[in-house]
């Protein structure tokens, strides 16, 4: 007997109501940011403390709420008494929270050994606490892809269903056609969130136009960008929204196989995604005749080694096939000849995470959010010299300065913002004077930066932009696959020049030399790694020419980070 979606939803709602009404529910953020701060130890301490006291409560290890600066986060719901989120909790504080909050049901508003209540969630709680939605990192948010992050157990499919999950898939299979799903995505104006910002609906149409019997949907979570962690954050927090998005993409394009491509070592995203896929199979949401329809789709996780270039779509396909991750020559394009020689579509994790809500609410709803041709939201990873760091989902069209100074709280310690590095190592550097930009793919590109992966790294006045540019090129040089000469040699040559400048051994010809190298890389490289490799240098030269001149002409670093050699001049100067 086929289980209907109504059967699944009825069971999910019953379980969700029990979670929220029968006993206290403790949610602990155990995404990578939480783990790094000791969240697993805090979760174990709660398990032990509750068992020792014989206290009946549910403990769930959830994903990232976005307030990474305050990890470990503990979210306590006492039925009838409200829900409170505490920040900077450690093992020594667990006993006090159980004694003072769980037993009495009264939130602790004073600091408990350094732990503090950040705010309440949902219904208002009498007392000194404010709503968590008033927190600077939450006040400007409009959560779509992150709607469930930190709120549901990523290992429980029923919690996802109880919060609207798989409703879009059921609607697609029972109420509308594959062409309708494709049209909703097209109308939404959704653009790829992996870096290129290519319209997703257009990309899907390329694949839908193929009559091949076997077609593939690939979802890219290589995410090796320094400063970017939103793809991993989504898969750790709400993997089912990505799984559902991929199934919908398969339905819309007539594909029947899918892969979620994740880098080795990212155990949280890997384990939780595999569990989500297994649960979807168990409930008939993957496999043959999904929900009793004539649509069949299979999905699995594929892993790659530490290779940044494997995030390039054709290199990704090579890795899935078991070969070294190196880009292919194009044409043919993936929609014609992709993985295993079959027509293929590749999208980023964030792109797929939006799809269920677009199909459930309609493309026009999504198109009504954002700015010009950049519809929807931007999921930003805020790091570096900022008061509040973490992951936020902000509508496109919000000014970047508002994000930096209101959402992220500005630069701490009374220091000034010097520059930003955005969009990963192939993105750009923006001076503090150039941050009066709205979140828009095209506006960022015109400014010499890339919104790309969503990484925003802030640097204060003590950071040397020349040295940071050297670090970015060193990363790009190390990660070059070496297949094409312009990238392989260009990255190495440009790094040599930057290292010479940082040693205060640069010459007056070095800036023109780097520009020449960059132009050759852009013109002759096979993939975006080489084509965009000059971006960090070009943008740094555009906004900070004086700092480069100071290093070269005055043999001095304005921040004191770069030092003159204490030994004999290197061969590079001869």
Image (cartoon, rainbow, N blue to C red):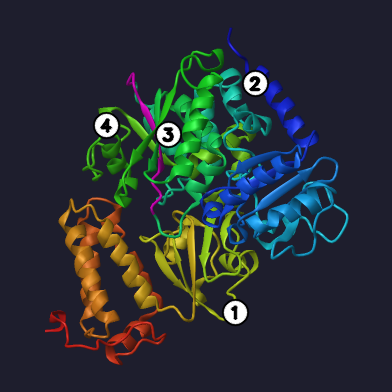
Binning the other alpha carbons within 10 Å of mark 4 as few (below 14), some (14 to 19) or many (20 upward) gives: some
Label 2 or label 3, whichever lies nearer to me, is: 2
Residue tagged 2:
8
Quarter of the image with the C terminus is bottom left
Binning the other alpha carbons within 10 Å of mark 3 as few (below 14), some (14 to 19) or many (20 upward) gives: many
Q: What range is drawn magenta here?
A: 212-224
Which quadrant holds residue 496?
A: bottom left
Q: Position of residue 414 (x, y in %)?
A: 60, 81
Which residue is at 58% across, 50% downward?
41
Binning the other alpha carbons within 10 Å of mark 1 as few (below 14), some (14 to 19) or many (20 upward) gives: few
Work out whether mark 3 precedes mark 1 in sequence or the reverse, and give the earlier one: 3
Query: Do tag 2 and tag 4 residues touch (Cβ < 8 Å)?
Result: no
Spatial separation of the CA atoms under disc 3 and disc 1: 48 Å
Which residue is at 64% across, 28% downward?
158
Work out whether mark 1 precedes mark 4 in sequence or the reverse, and give the earlier one: 4
Query: Do tag 1 and tag 4 residues touch (Cβ < 8 Å)?
Result: no
Label 3 or label 1, whichever lies nearer to me, is: 1
Which quadrant holds residue 16?
A: top right
Work out whether mark 2 precedes mark 3 in sequence or the reverse, and give the earlier one: 2
Q: Position of residue 460 (x, y in %)?
A: 50, 77
| 83 inside magenta stretch | no
Q: Secondary structure at mark 4?
A: loop
Binning the other alpha carbons within 10 Å of mark 2 as few (below 14), some (14 to 19) or many (20 upward) gives: some
Residue tagged 3:
204
Check residue 337 in the rendering and tell me which mark sits there, or answer none: 4
Spatial separation of the CA atoms under disc 2 and disc 3: 29 Å
């Amino acid at each position: 007997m086929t289980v209907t979606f109504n059967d699944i939803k009825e069971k999910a709602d019953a379980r969700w109501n029990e979670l929220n009404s029968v006993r206290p529910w403790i949610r602990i953020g155990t995404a990578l940011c939480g783990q790094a701060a000791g969240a697993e130890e805090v979760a174990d301490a709660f398990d032990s403390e509750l068992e020792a006291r014989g206290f009946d409560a549910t403990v769930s290890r959830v994903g990232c709420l976005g307030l990474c600066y305050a990890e470990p986060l503990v979210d306590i719901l006492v039925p009838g008494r409200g829900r409170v989120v505490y920040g900077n909790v450690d093992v020594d504080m667990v006993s006090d929270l159980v004694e003072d909050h769980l037993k009495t049901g009264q939130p602790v508003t004073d600091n408990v050994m350094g732990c503090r209540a950040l705010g309440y969630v949902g219904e208002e709680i009498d007392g000194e606490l404010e709503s968590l939605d008033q927190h600077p990192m939450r006040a400007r948010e409009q959560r779509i892809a992150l709607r469930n992050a930190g709120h549901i157990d990523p290992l429980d499919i029923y919690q996802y269903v109880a919060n609207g999950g798989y409703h879009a898939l059921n609607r697609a299979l029972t109420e509308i056609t594959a062409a309708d799903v494709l049209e909703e995505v097209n109308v939404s104006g959704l653009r790829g969130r992996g870096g290129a910002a290519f319209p997703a609906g257009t990309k899907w149409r390329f694949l839908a136009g193929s009559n091949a019997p076997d077609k593939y949907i690939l979802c890219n979570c290589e995410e090796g960008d320094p400063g970017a962690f939103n793809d991993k954050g989504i898969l750790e927090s709400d993997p089912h929204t990505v799984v559902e998005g991929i199934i919908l993409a398969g339905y819309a394009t007539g594909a029947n196989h899918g892969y979620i491509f994740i880098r080795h070592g990212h155990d949280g995203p890997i384990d939780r995604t595999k569990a989500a896929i297994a649960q979807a199979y168990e409930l008939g949401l993957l496999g043959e005749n999904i929900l009793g329809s004539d649509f069949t789709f299979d999905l699995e996780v594929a892993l790659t080694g530490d290779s940044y270039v494997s995030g390039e779509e054709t290199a990704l396909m090579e890795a899935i096939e078991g070969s070294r991750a190196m880009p292919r020559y194009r044409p043919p394009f993936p929609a014609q000849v992709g993985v295993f020689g079959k027509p293929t579509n590749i999208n980023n994790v964030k792109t797929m995470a939006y799809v269920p809500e677009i199909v459930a609410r309609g493309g026009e709803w999504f198109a009504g959010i954002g700015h010009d041709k950049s519809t929807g939201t931007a999921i930003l990873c805020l790091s570096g010299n900022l008061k509040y760091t973490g992951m936020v989902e902000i509508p496109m069209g919000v000014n970047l300065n508002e994000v930096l100074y209101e959402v992220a709280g500005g630069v701490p310690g009374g220091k000034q913002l010097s520059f930003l590095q955005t969009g990963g190592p192939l993105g750009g550097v923006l001076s503090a004077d150039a941050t009066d930009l709205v979140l828009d793919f095209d506006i960022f590109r015109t400014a010499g930066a890339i919104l790309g992966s969503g990484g925003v790294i802030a640097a204060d006045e003590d950071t040397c932009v020349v040295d940071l540019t050297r670090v970015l090129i060193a990363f790009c040089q190390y990660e070059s696959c070496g297949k094409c000469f312009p990238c392989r040699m260009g990255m190495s040559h440009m790094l040599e020049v930057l290292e010479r400048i940082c040693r205060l051994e640069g010459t007056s010809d070095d800036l023109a030399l780097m520009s020449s190298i960059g132009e050759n890389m852009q013109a002759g490289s096979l993939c975006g790694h080489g084509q965009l490799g000059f971006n960090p240098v070009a943008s740094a030269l555009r906004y900070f020419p004086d700092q480069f001149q100071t290093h070269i002409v005055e043999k001095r670093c304005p921040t004191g980070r770069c030092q003159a050699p204490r030994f004999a001049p290197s061969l590079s100067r001869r």
